[in-house]
Amino acid sequence: MTARTLTCQVLEVSDLTPDVFRVLLEGRAEAMAHAPGQYLEMRLDEDTWVPFSIASRHAGDGLLELHIQHWPERSNSALLRRMLVVAEHLEVRLPSGDCVLDVESQRPLLLIAAGTGFAQMKAIIEEVHHMTPERPVSLWWAAKDRRDLYAEPMVREWVRGADNLVFHGVCETGFEEGFAEDRVVGHHGRVDIALAEALSDVSAEDVYLSGSPGMVYACLDVLAPLGLDEARVFSDVFSYAPRTPLISTSREGEALQEGQKRN
């Protein structure tokens, strides 16, 4: 789809946590069309466009959801927050991004996100539930603190309603007792290390990653020795922060695997 610039209406701005807010936009249905996994760019001023992952599948109703991290110390973030609260209309450009769900594939999905990178995975999961509900999905969502898993109740509802979905929460500060339930697993620490400890073979899976370049490539390095197929791994990071080689089979990654097995 070719990117287009349009004006849309701001229907709702609501806090999900003190640091993350949800924005609901509405525009002409055909103009708001996008593939699951794509992002839009929002115009802040004459020269500034800011990208945000689209957190909802295209349902043909003209509605579109965003999850936005608020950083009070960053001028763009503060400007955006103020603008959204008072704005009735916004200028946006969409769709953008090549990290989109392959709807032709029936391979199991391994979705790995950090923070508001969950927004991209939410759109993908919604599309899978709508189009191919039998397709297995494993969602790994990483955050520093549990409160940063801002849609945890919704994800738990997904899990209870879909036998093919498994949710792995990864928290640097850990989880209290009671987090785990059927097909909900808690991991303490960094997401790349949690993946190394829990997985043994990803050769049959389509892998999608959303987070910082450091997080994405750290995860790739631990997945590479597990049979990761370079043709079946997707991330926006590959476009704006490319690495050569993309998939490394470095001794460091293998050493991390062995170290986790021994521990």
Image (cartoon, rainbow, N blue to C red):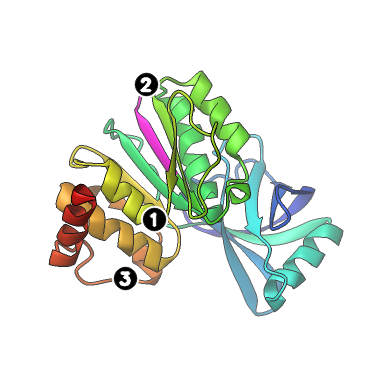
- Secondary structure under tag 3 reads loop
**Magenta residues, as a range?**
135-140
Amino acid type at mark 3: Pro
- Secondary structure under tag 1 reads loop
Residue visible at 24% across and 50% down?
263
Q: Main secondary structure of the magenta part?
A: strand
In magenta segment, residue 185: no
**Residue 77: percent from the left, percent from the top?**
69, 70
| Residue 214 in the image: above or below residue 28 | below
Q: From mark 2 to mark 3, how far is it between C-alphas?
A: 33 Å
Residue visible at 72% across and 71% down?
72
Q: Please tell me which residue lies in front, 41 or 81.
A: 81
Residue 41 left/right relative to 73: left
Do the numbered discs 1 and 2 sit on residues whose CB atoms are within 8 Å?
no
Label 3: which residue?
242
Label 1: which residue?
98
Label 2: which residue?
134
Q: Residues within 10 Å of mark 2 (few under 14, many from 20)?
A: some
- Secondary structure under tag 2 reads loop
Q: Please tell me which residue lies in front, 247 or 56.
A: 247
In magenta segment, residue 138: yes
Residue 116 left/right relative to 64: left
Can residue 228 be seen here? The reply is: no
**Residue 255: percent from the left, percent from the top?**
16, 61
